[in-house]
Image: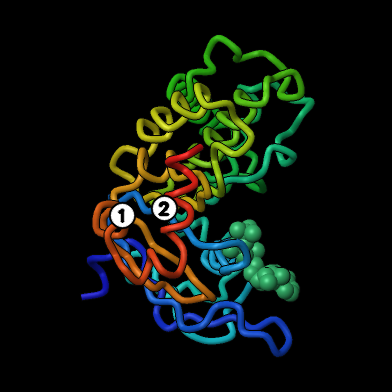
Amino acid sequence: MSTSYALELLDLRKNFGKTEIIRGAQLQVRAGERVAVIGPNGAGKSTLFNLISGRFAPSSGEIRLHGERIAGLPPYQINRRGLARSFQVSNLFTRLSVFENIRCAVLWSLGHRYAFWKFLADLEDANERAEQVLAMIKLDRRRDVLAMNLSYAEARALEIGITIAGGSSVILLDEPTAGMSKSETQRFIQLIREVTEGKTLLTVEHDMGVVFGLADKIAVLVYGEVIAFDTPEAVRANARVQEAYLGSVLAEAAHG
Ligand SMILES: Nc1ncnc2c1ncn2[C@@H]1O[C@H](COP(=O)(O)OP(=O)(O)OP(=O)(O)O)[C@@H](O)[C@H]1O
C-alpha cells in the first residue's frame, strides 16, 4: 500500500525541450530510511531533487509524500506537507545571527508571516525550538555570531539546521559535505545522522565515503532511471551497477 512509504516516485519523467532527462524513475522510500542517490555526472540527480521539492514540475508521472500526491505542487506547499530541502550557503541571511537564521526558519514553518497576533503568541515556542535546533547542530556557542562570520563547515551546519527547523519528516540534502576536509566530513556525517534520526533522508552524494557512512540504502540513477535501489552491500555487488557506474568510482575511492 502506498501510504507505508514516506516518498514514492512513480514512472517520473522530465523533459527539457526535446531531451528527456528523467526517464521513468521509480523509487519507494520507507519512513525512516536514509537514502543516498548516486550516479554519474549528468544522470539527473539534481533534476530529481528539483522535481521532488517542487522547483520543477514533472512532464509526467507521480510523486507521493506519505501517500499524498505532490507532483507539480509549488515548493512551499510541498514543504507544508512535511518535506524540506537544504538550501545552499548563499541562501543564509548573512547579516543575521545564527540564532536569528534558525528562528526565521522556525517561524516560516509555522506559517505566521501574516498573522501578527498569532506570531506573538508563538514567538516563545519558536525561540525554544530554535534553541533546540542550535544545540542539535552544535552551534549553540556560536549563537550570536552573524552568519557571514561562520566558517564554511559551520555555515553548512547552519544550512542543515534551517532545513530541519520546521520539523519536516522528509529531508533532502544536496551534497551536504561538499567542500569539506576529510575530518570535517567525518564529523558532519555524524551530525547528519543525529539530526535526521527517525526521519527519512535523501542525499545526493558523490563522495563514496559519505555514501557508505550515511546511507541505509543507495539509489543508483543512470540516464534518468533508477537502475538499482538496495543496501550499500547489495549495490556494491550489483553487476549492472558495477558496469554502469560504481566499479570505476569504487576503484577510484580505493586508490584515493
Ligand atoms: N533547467 C534545465 N534546462 C535544460 N537542461 C537541463 C536543466 N537542468 C538540467 N539540465 C540537463 O539535465 C541533465 C542532468 O542534469 P542534473 O544536474 O540533474 O544531473 P546531475 O546528476 O545532478 O549531475 P552532476 O552530478 O554533474 O551534478 C544535464 O545534461 C543537464 O544539462
- The image position of residue 110, as x and y in percent, is 52, 44
Viewer-side residue, 106 vs 54: 54
Q: In 3D space, how far apart are the residues under numbered discs 2 and 1 (Cα atoms)? A: 7 Å
Indicate the secondary structure of the residue bearing disc 1: strand
Identified at 61% across, 76% down, the residue is 57
- The image position of residue 83, as x and y in percent, is 46, 55
On screen, residue 116 above or below 38: above
Amino acid type, mark 1: Lys
Viewer-side residue, 75 vs 226: 226
Q: Residues within 10 Å of mark 1 (few under 14, many from 20)?
A: many
- In the rendered structure, the answer to whether residue 149 lies left or right of residue 117 reads right
Indicate the secondary structure of the residue bearing disc 2: strand
- The image position of residue 224, as x and y in percent, is 52, 75
Amino acid type, mark 2: Ala
On screen, residue 216 above or below 126: below
Q: Earlier in the sequence, mark 2 or mark 1?
A: 2
Q: Which residue is mark 1?
A: 217
**Residue 1 position by quadrant:** bottom left
Identified at 51% across, 37% down, the residue is 256
Identified at 29% across, 49% down, the residue is 216
- The image position of residue 41, as x and y in percent, is 61, 62
Q: Which mark is residue 36?
A: 2
On screen, residue 245 above or below 133: below
Residue 106 in sight: no
CB under 8 Å between discs 2 and 1: yes
Task: Looking at this view, name the residue that lies furthest to the right.
Answer: 95
